[in-house]
Image (cartoon, rainbow, N blue to C red):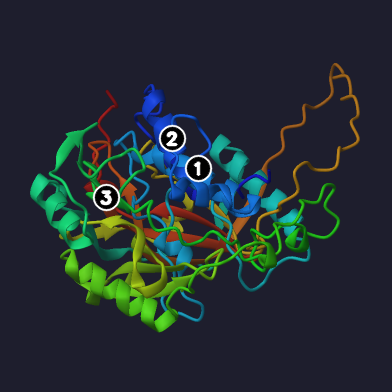
Amino acid sequence: MPPLPPDDPFDRLRDADPAAGAEPDVDRLNAAVAARTGDLAAAPVDELAARRRRLPMGARWFQVAAGVAALAIVGTGSFALGAGQSGSDQVAAGSPIPAAIDLGGAVAESGAGAPASADSAAMKADGRMSMGFGGRTVFTGSGLSTDGGTATAWGFDAEATFASEGAARIAEALGVTGEPVQEWGSWQVGPNDGTAPMVQVQPDGLTSVNYYDPTVQAGQCVDTSTSMGGAADAPSGSAVEIAPAPAPATCTGGEPAPGADQAIERTREVLRTIGVDDTAYDFALTESWTTELASVSAELLLDGQRTGVAWNVTLAAGGVVQSLYGTLAPTVELGALDIISPADAVARLTDPRFGSTWGGIMPLARTAGLAAEPDLAIMPVEPDFTVPPTPRAGAQLPWAVTEVTLTSARLGLGLTTLDNGATVLLPSYELSDDSGTTWSVVAVADAHLDFAPAG
C-alpha cells in the first residue's frame, strides 16, 4: 500500500493538537471504519458495503485512510481540520495577490529562480532552519529599509459564532438532520459513526466548521495522471518506485464533477446559504485526484491581502457537497499598530522572544526552489557511512555557523494563535535572500506585545 504524501500543514496541525494524548473511543472508530469499508464483521451487510468492496485497491486505500484521518482529527473535537490555514497554499495560478505570510512552520513552494537541484535546495533549507532555530545562523540585512510605520491587525470574534444555533443553521443549510449536541466541547449535528452526514462546530479561535457526507460515493476511481498515480510520477532515479494505481479501465467511474466555473459558483451559493459573505473571498479550483470530485478553495481577503483563512469545499456531480470545512468567526479590526522596520526584523530572527512557541510566532525558512510534487520514493538510497574523526587535544572544535544576507522584505498578514487561545492576523515580514529562500517573522512593535513570563 503506498503511503500518503507528506503534508507539512497537516503535521503542524497534528503536533499542535492540545488533545493529542486523549484516548480514542476504539469501538466507535471501529464502527466508523467498518461503515466506510464494509470489511469488518461489525458492519451491516448491505449494497453500499458490497459496492465499497468492489472498489479498486488504489482508490480504496485512499478513501479508508482519508476517512480514518478525518475521524482522528474531527473526533477529538479539540483542533479542527478546518483551522483555516490552508488558503495560502492554494493561490490560483497567475493571481496578482501574494500569499499570506506563514508564521507556523516550513512549507515548500515552487517558484522562479529555482536552483539546479531540488534536493540540494531542500537540504539547504533544512540546514538553515535547524541552525536558525538553534541560534547558529547569523542574519544580516543589505539594502533593507530602516523605516517603521503602522499596519492594521485583525482578530476573530469566536464568542459571537460558537453556539448551538450556529450549528443548527449550518446543518439545516446542508440537509443534516438532528439536534445539536455537545461532545468534546464541539457542537455536533448528525451521527459521528460514518453512517450519515455530520456537522461539527469547534470551540477554537476561528469557530472552525467541519462537514462530511459519507453517503456521497464519488471519487472511487483515482486519476492516475495526478501525483497520487504512482510510478509514472515518481522522480527519476528513485531507489524504490511505487507501483502504479489500477488503470481507469478496471474501475467503473461515476458522473464527472462540475467544471471550474460551475464548481466555484456552487461554492459561493453554499457559503451564502450558511451565512458567509462570499464577496470577501478569493475563489480557486484546486487539484483533485479524481474527475468525480471538484475541490474549491475560498480564501478570505482583507484590504486586498490574503489571510490564509479559507473555506474548502469538495463537490460531486450535480453540485452535491461531499465535504466542507472553514471558519465562521467574523473579523474584528484591532486598529493600526506600530511595526518595526525590515532592517530591525532581521534581528528578530535570532531573538529568543520570537522563537518557536505553541502559538506559532517563529522565524520561518521557506525555499522557493523546491519541487511542488513530493518525493514518493519509499526508502532513500543508503548513504556511505564513515566513522567520525577522533577529537584531538589543542585542535579547534568545529562549530558551523550559517551566514545569511537578507536583501528584500515583503509586509503581509500572518495568522497565529495567542497564548490565550485567540486567533489573530498580525502584520508580518517575509525576508528573502538572493537565492529565493525566505524567513518570516511578526512585524508588530514590542510596545504592543505582552512579554509577561509564561505560567
Q: Is residue 180 left or right of residue 246?
A: left
Q: Is residue 355 left or right of residue 119?
A: left
Of the two numbered discs 1 and 2 on the same chain, state the one appearing first in sequence.
Answer: 1
Contact, CB < 8 Å: mark 1 with mark 2? yes
Amino acid residing under circle 2: Ala
| Callout 1: SS | helix
Disc 1: which residue: 37
Q: Position of residue 146 (x, y in %)?
A: 41, 64
Disc 3: which residue: 208
| Closer-to-camera residue (298/51) | 51
Q: Quadrant of residue 366?
A: bottom right
Of the two numbered discs 3 and 1 on the same chain, state the one appearing first in sequence.
Answer: 1
| Closer-to-camera residue (168/452) | 168
Amino acid residing under circle 3: Ser
| Callout 2: SS | loop
Disc 2: which residue: 43
